[in-house]
Image: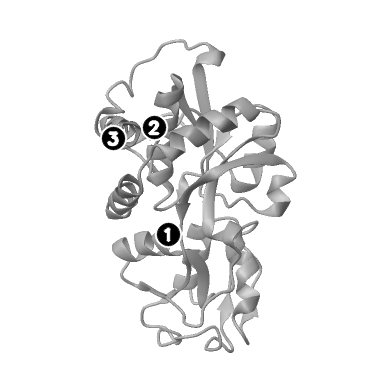
């Protein structure tokens, strides 16, 4: 209990005061850095802002840009517990695992699920969030009254490339599986343009989109998607040979209580 309480306080300290040194410039030895890769384009897990705030963190490879979101708060806590200086790199989704393997980054904290295919290339920690999958549609569209996976006949559904979202589209009976797009914002643009009827997302991502874009709504289906346990959770990805780091990060994650995780996600959804 003491361990959980201590780390909970540490998390809150970094959430509210973690960016005080955002604008300072100083040299940090490579071994003292914890470099995290993420898209910074995946609300509420991670996104990009043009201003500094008590919640976000500067993006190292995009001057004047800042990353916020649930993943960023988890990254802050892990880096602090490791005694490292956090460095955030904004990367395309498909570049995350290659960048980790090439040692450009030390970890992927990007809402990534520990699928069997990915486990061939990287190690995954225990989960740091578990979610459910929903369908995002236009609030005034043809499919707003859909209740089950059987109610999407004729719809064009597009998923994000290389994700479980795209893999789940065929479970929507009668829907056309459109060509996957690189980012969720690309899909949203297609939906607003009338070319796409919907997309599959995790519930927190859909909540973040709908909270700031009332033209969209999300559907919790029953019966819903058949999703494996590994695809319901997100984990930190590390290099295959870094077992000591894996053990250390798992201990840190174990110290983050479920209450703190829920609070961090709720707050991220509110800011997204």
Q: Which tag is nearer the camera, tag 1 or tag 3? A: 3
Q: Which tag is nearer the camera, tag 2 or tag 3? A: 3
Percent position of residue 156, x then y: 58, 79
Q: Residue at x 50, y 15 (%)?
A: 32
- Viewer-closest of 111 and 159: 111
Secondary structure beneath label 3:
helix
What whole-number distance in Å separates the C-alpha atoms at marks 1 and 3? Answer: 28 Å
Percent position of residue 47, x then y: 42, 46
Secondary structure beneath label 1:
helix
What whole-number distance in Å separates the C-alpha atoms at marks 2 and 1? Answer: 21 Å
Residue that label 2 marks: 77
Answer whether residue 106 is visible to the viewer in this image: no
Mark identifier at residue 5: 3
Residue furthest right in the image: 120
Residue that label 1 marks: 205
Placement of 14 over or under 227, stated as above or below: above
Mark identifier at residue 248: none
Q: Residue at x 46, y 60 (%)?
A: 131
- Viewer-closest of 86 and 42: 86
């Amino acid at each position: 209990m003491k361990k959980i309480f201590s780390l909970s306080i540490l998390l809150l300290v970094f959430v509210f005061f973690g960016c005080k040194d955002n604008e300072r410039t100083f040299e940090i030895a490579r071994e003292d850095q914890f470099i995290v890769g993420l898209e910074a384009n995946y609300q509420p897990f991670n996104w990009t802002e043009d201003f500094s705030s008590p919640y976000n963190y500067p993006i190292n490879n995009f001057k004047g840009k800042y990353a916020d979101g649930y993943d960023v708060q988890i990254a802050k806590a892990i880096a602090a517990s490791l005694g490292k200086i956090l460095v955030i790199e904004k990367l395309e989704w498909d570049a995350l695992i290659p960048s980790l393997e090439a040692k450009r980054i030390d970890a992927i904290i990007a809402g990534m699920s520990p699928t069997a295919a990915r486990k061939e290339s990287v190690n995954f920690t225990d989960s740091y969030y578990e979610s459910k999958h929903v369908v995002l549609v236009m609030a005034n569209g043809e499919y707003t009254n859909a209740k089950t996976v059987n109610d999407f006949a004729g719809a064009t559904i597009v998923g994000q490339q290389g994700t479980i979202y795209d893999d789940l589209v065929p479970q929507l009976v009668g829907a056309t599986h459109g060509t996957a797009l690189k980012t969720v914002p690309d899909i949203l643009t297609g939906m607003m343009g009338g070319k796409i009827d919907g997309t599959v997302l995790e519930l927190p991502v859909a909540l973040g989109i709908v909270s700031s874009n009332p033209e969209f709504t999300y559907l919790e289906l029953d019966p819903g998607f058949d999703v494996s346990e590994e695809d319901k959770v997100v984990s930190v990805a590390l290099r295959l040979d870094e077992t000591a780091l894996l053990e250390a990060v798992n201990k840190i994650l174990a110290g983050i209580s479920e209450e703190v995780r829920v609070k961090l996600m709720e707050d991220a959804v509110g800011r997204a």
